[in-house]
Amino acid sequence: MTLPDIKSLTREELEAQFKLWNEPAFRATQLLDWLYARRATSWDAMTNLPKSLREKLRENFSLQILGLARKQGAGDTTQKFLWQLADGAFIESVLIPANPALYGEASDRHTLCISTQVGCAYGCRFCASGLDGWKRNLGVHEIVEQILAVERWNAAQPKEESVEPTADRIVNNIVVMGMGEPLANYDNLIAALKILNAPWGGGIGARRMTISTSGLAPQIRKLAVEPMQFRLAISLHGATDEVRNRIMPVNKKYPLHELTGACEDYQKLKGRMITLEYILIAGINDALDQTRPLATLAKKLYAKVNLIPYNKVEGLPWVRPAEEVCDRFLTALEKLDVTATLRREKGGDIDAACGQLRLKTERELKTQ
Ligand code: SAH
Ligand code: SF4
């Protein structure tokens, strides 16, 4: 029988458990401090908890730690972490240093891009994460652990090599844009983000958390009634059904009118700005005839547009358009009064597009 992981519990759940065990309430505070402030990696490290309590915890809960399988990038640049999970599966997180405020965040922040699933079932034609299909959802603790593991890694670096030697924590922005479709693992995602937001947990503001979705309309509506103020990014990549159908199978299920309907409802309820992500892929969606429908959509949703030049994925035929083409697309959008940015890629040199390091590692392992 697999035990529930201790990092999938809220403070309330933990307190209820301790009450059942007749443990005083302050023990829960001590345990949370070990888990989230000190980022302990074993029960034995929790020296101020009585041995008997540690034994009880060990018998009833797992304490899983992500193992660093591989890391790319160095210093204060984009760094990619490949983690191995307890069942051997691999996932990725990417640490991005101080970015221009792409998702409305303050610009002096470190952003961690996290995964929510092993693989992805949505099979967007251009994406490495979906190439080998979907394996499983991540548990709450596996989502939470990505932040803790990066913090742990940074704290263990020699002072001159750590990202920000003086900071106790380095991650203060989360983008859920790694492997997997976050809204297809809805409950675990929200539970994990709540833990990462709680003052006793990650202490990261909900406004500093951006959820990216390929367009699951019903779940966008569900997210709209969540009390927390997460940011929402939609992976649009095509402003007409014709283009979107060609590259994103999810559009057959939730075509543009349904997706935009859900976004409009979200916008009405939340009053928050949505970001539309638009990867520019040569010959697929980079022609200027896409700019007018894209502008119409963006204005209808009061959304800003993030243009992202495509990152080459090994084994896929798609290519990034020339720089002039990207610039021309941006200018055309701006002429149509749309707020848009063109991302000058960080980390393109380290397979930064989601899912690539995992794919490469799994394929290497298979051929060994
Ligand atoms: N499944 C979610 C979140 C993970 S993908 C979603 O699709 O939104 C995060 C973002 O990376 C998406 O906008 C996705 O379209 C984009 N992406 C995937 N492969 C890419 C590539 N090769 N180059 C650039 N962006 C890519
Ligand atoms: Fe899945 Fe997002 Fe990749 Fe599409 S872009 S396959 S939804 S991870």
Image: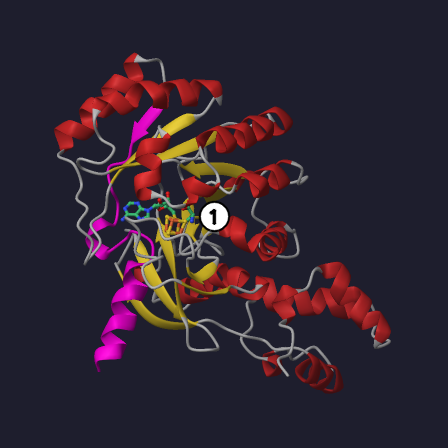
Residue at x 54%, y 39% (from the top left corner): 217
Q: Could you say which quadrant of the image residue 55 lies in?
A: bottom right
The reply to whether residue 135 is visible in this rendering is: yes
| Foreground residue among 194 and 171 | 194
Say whether residue 206 is visible: no
Q: Quadrant of residue 266?
A: top right
Q: In the rendered view of the protein, which quadrant contains the C terminus?
A: bottom left
Looking at the image, residue 155 lies above or below residue 263 = below
Position of 288 with respect to 31 (left or right) is left
How many labels sit on residues? 1
234 is higher (above) or lower (below) than 65: above
The foreground one among 224 and 40 is 224
Mark 1 lies on a secondary structure that is strand
Which part of the image, by quadrant, shows the N terminus? bottom right
Q: Amino acid at mark 1?
A: Ile
Q: Is residue 356 magenta?
A: yes
Question: Disc 1 beta carbon < 8 A from ligand 1?
Answer: no
Where is residue 100 drawn, in percent x and y? 35, 34
Residue density around tag 1, few if under 14, some if 14–19, many if 20 or more, within 10 Å: many
Report whether 227 appears left or right of 150: right
Q: Position of residue 122 (x, y in %)?
A: 41, 52
Q: Residue tagged by mark 1?
A: 174
Residue at 30% from the left image edge and 56% from the top image edge = 128
- Where residue 62 sits: x, y (%)? 61, 78
Is residue 215 found inside the magenta-colored segment of the image? no
- Specify the segment rendered in magenta: 340-368
Q: Give the colouring mode of the picture.
A: secondary structure
Residue 105 higher or lower than 336, as above or below: below
Residue at 55 percent of width and 55 percent of height: 185
Q: Where's residue 352, x and y in %?
A: 28, 53
Judge whether 280 appears above or below 148 on screen: above
